[in-house]
Image (cartoon, rainbow, N blue to C red):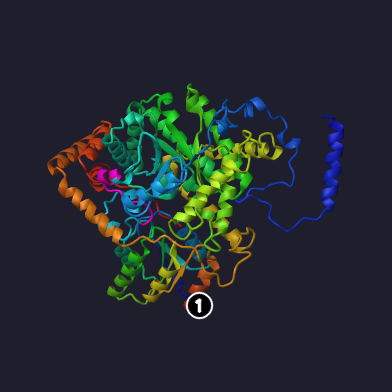
Amino acid sequence: MARKVRVLIAKPGLDGHDRGAKVVANALKDAGMEIIYTGLHQTPEMIAESAVQEDVDIVGLSILSGAHMTMFPRIMELMKEKGAEHILIFGGGIIPAEDMDKLEEIGVARIFGPGTDTGDIVTFIRERFPEE
Amino acid sequence: MDRKKYEDRKKRYFDTLSGCGCQDIEYTTVSGEEVKELYTPDDIEGFDYNEELGFPGQYPYTRGVYPNMYRGRFWTQRQFAGFGTPKDTNGRYHYLLDHGQMGLSVDFDMPTIMGYDSDHKRSEGEVGRCGVAIDSLKDMELLFDGIDPGAITTSMTINAPASIMLAFYLCAGEKKGTAFEKMGGTIQNDILKEYIAQKSWIFPPEESIRIITDILAFCTDHVPRWNTISISGYHIREAGSTAIQELAFTLADGFAYVEAGIAAGLDVDKFAPRLSFFFNAHLDFFEEIVKYRVARRIWAKRMRQQYGAKDPKSLLLRFHTQTAGCSLTAQQPENNIVRTAFQGMSAVLGGTQSLHTNSMDEVLALPSEKAVRIALRTQQLIAYETGVINTIDPLAGSYFIEAKTTEMEEAAEEYFHKIDELGGVVKAIDRGFFQREIQKSAYEYQKAVEAGRKVIVGVNRFRLENEEIDIPLLRIDEEVEREQKKAVQDVREARDNDKVSRELERLRAAAEGTENLMPVIIDCARCYCTEGEITDTLKGVFGEYIEPLFI
């Protein structure tokens, strides 16, 4: 049997806005992916650990508190330390365009802003992980 | 009315209508509720004016809580603001007051909301980002520098640590010579909706409710002008609920607080007059107006019939409104000014007591000065130019509005029944009932948008290709975090640390016992204990909440 794509949906930082994370999680699940949701208020360490433990292909980070320029780079660093650079990282939330560019420069595959169609996220993942 | 003539004309109308074309549009509210093409006297058959509406300022208050409404005074124009250091935000407060704003509203940063000091590890990257950082009484003094706490009212959007921020505010006022009983304002202090929707919690429900009833008791005796809980539907709606869910879950939370107060031995007529509400003003104009009217009616009925309230003030559902942040679009952000204007007007037609209109750029960042001025001007336009304030509750008696008001009341009652069956609000939270209901609605809405059944101008229709956002955004300097970290460390060095230890020890003992915590927290505030120290002490006794996980 083909292995389903495994996605960790994670909420770094202190904000509790989980609407987007959960909508995306549901959309990916409906698209046939396997979803693990971390819950709120995760530290970068907790997220990197979960990603490795759960042996996921992808991590989706959702943040709306404005702390993305601290959280995302730290998570990227930890993934590297854990030898888990192969895991694809994408994100979403209230993130200004210039920060999006900076995050993509440090290796975040894509930042999806407000108003994104979940179909675009599914396509983005399928292009990188075609169904086996 | 000539009944025969009416029936004839009605038949003729519907016969003609069935021959007319109809656009291929889904005629439902933003919450997915069906709306008919026409409402007629048939839809409000048996409608009893005295029972359902009454006059403004009369039971059941459907037409408004005051007899004179906006002829007496306008709603309070209260823009929520906070960013960076207390000094940064103080500047914004002076700016808003100078432009005619009538009351202040404090937006705290995430570490403050979650009970962490600015130099805590978990605060990294978050200090002053989505609100102002407040660590101790010292910061509160800076935040209100040059502002007289006896002359304005202040609303503080704070929940889990509400007791601490209230203590800081009262002590800051006290230092300026304003007595507790002279200070007016609001703390949100609505922890139930945190578990349900906004999810900024610290302690478990039972312990949180104990803190809340302590605040109710303390303020009743010592801070009588304070609104002790702002029972909030706003965040429930932002999390994706429908209008009916917002209404029903919020009122259910309200009943739970009333029950907790009564169970703690308080007289309902002593604390209920200081409970207030906070609703969302979403996109569907009439659905929102209906929601506010029905909220007043249900609250008045329940307070009288179920909780035995006798003071008419206990029956009044007074509310603040904020326009829907979740309805704003990052695409063509200037359109948000228009959305917000319609939403603000629905709140006014629904009889709100105070209003925050969102700035067009809030979907991108915290609002810039110009954006926030336009938002404030929007309220001034509604008040002074549109004429909607000339008469009270102008939509009363509309077949459509009254039929929908009754319908929404019935739908809310069904939810109350379900919540009762689950064993009440706290049990329903434990079982994830509200969370699932909201999540389901949010996902349904997203699917409706993606299928094009719901149109969002500039997002799934009428888009600009290669749109560049060209409005200026407020950026928070990284210096803020360093400055604020140093500030809290300076406070710890300058104070009497023996006294701090003694007060924190007293707090621990009080938390273990049954003594009212407020006076002890106030003593902690007076000797400059930090928010994090007070929270940690309470965590040591109360523990922390762990959310039920599901998608």
At 58% from the left and 63% from the top, the residue drawn is: B459
Give the residue drawn at x 64%, y 59%: B453
Q: Quadrant of residue B290?
A: top right
Instruction: Please indicate, yes or no, whether residue A130 appears anywhere in the rendered image.
Output: no
In magenta, the rendered stretch is: B129-141
Q: Nearer the viewer, residue B533 or B241?
A: B533
Asked if the stretch drawn in magenta spans residue B133, the answer is yes
Under circle 1, the secondary element is helix
Q: In terms of image quadrants, where is residue B298?
A: top right
In this picture, residue A42 sits left or right of residue B415 = left
Q: Position of residue B365 (x, y in %)?
A: 44, 59
Residue B161 at x, y = what percent?
Answer: 32, 43
Foreground residue among B328 and B152 = B152
Horizontal side of residue B307 vs B67, given as left or right: left
Q: Position of residue B114 (x, y in %)?
A: 33, 50
Q: Please say whether residue B4 is visible from this viewpoint.
A: yes
Q: Residue furthest top?
A: B310
Q: Label 1, on which residue?
A: A127
Q: Nearer the viewer, residue B144 or B335?
A: B144
Q: Main secondary structure of the magenta part?
A: loop
Tell me the kind of residue under disc 1.
Glu
Q: What chain is tagged by disc 1?
A: A
- Determine the residue positioned at 27% across, 48% down: B135
Where residue B95 appears, as percent x and y from the top left, is 41, 48
Query: Relative to residue B350, is residue B132 depicted above or below?
Result: below
Q: Is residue B122 above or below residue B272?
A: below
